[in-house]
């Protein structure tokens, strides 16, 4: 079902949902939020787009296959666990690099951040695989 109202509203809502997903993602280190809930909102943005324009158009807009997102997410998860092992620590021990010492930026690059990026990518990829599969099933 094509709806002009839904299509018009989606153009605005997809940007708002995606920005909110990034807000939740970055807020999650210090307060509630993080990779999982941010990934759900990010996938929700593309799900809304798929409902409004169809799954084929949503796949073209995404430009990356959702299974690739899952694979890159798993790579990030493994990397976040292996970095401490190269420093003689246990798997998934948190390590931080404070960039304010080098670049005058108040930002902490850390293995938990890399882990959250992996979770975000895995959640977005998984939800989109499910949504696109259900959409294709319905079209047949």
Image (spheres, helix red, strand yellow):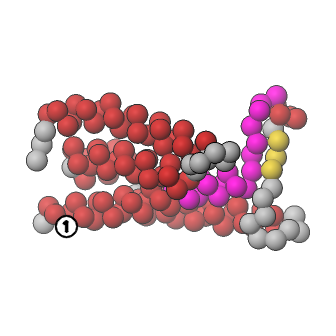
Q: Is residue 32 magenta?
A: no
Residue 73 percent location from the top left of the image = 55, 60
Please name whichever residue, 92 or 31, is drawn nearer the observer in this view of the structure: 31
Figure disc tally: 1
Question: In what element is the residue under mark 1?
Answer: helix
**Residue carrying label 1:** 137
Q: In the image, is 27 to the left or to the right of 132?
A: right
Q: Residue furthest bottom?
A: 90
Q: Main secondary structure of the magenta part?
A: helix
Instruction: Classify residue 84 as left or right of residue 114.
Output: right
Q: Position of residue 30 (x, y in %)?
A: 68, 45
Q: Quadrant of residue 92?
A: bottom right
Q: Is residue 17 left or right of residue 101?
A: left
Report x, y in % for residue 128. Answer: 36, 58
Q: Is 6 left or right of 82, judged from the image as shown?
A: left
Which portion, as a residue range, is magenta?
104-121
Quadrant of residue 78 within the rendered picture: bottom right
């Amino acid at each position: 079902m094509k709806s002009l109202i839904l299509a018009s509203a989606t153009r605005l809502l997809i940007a708002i949902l995606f920005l909110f997903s990034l807000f939740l993602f970055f807020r999650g280190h210090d307060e509630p939020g993080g990779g999982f809930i941010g990934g759900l909102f990010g996938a929700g943005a593309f799900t809304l787009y798929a409902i409004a324009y169809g799954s084929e158009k949503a796949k073209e807009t995404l430009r990356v296959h959702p299974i690739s997102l899952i694979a890159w997410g798993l790579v990030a998860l493994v990397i976040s666990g292996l970095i401490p092992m190269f420093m003689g620590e246990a798997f998934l021990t948190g390590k931080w690099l404070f960039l304010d010492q080098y670049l005058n930026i108040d930002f902490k690059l850390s293995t938990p951040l890399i882990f959250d990026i992996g979770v975000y990518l895995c959640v977005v990829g998984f939800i989109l695989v499910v949504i696109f599969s259900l959409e294709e099933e319905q079209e047949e």
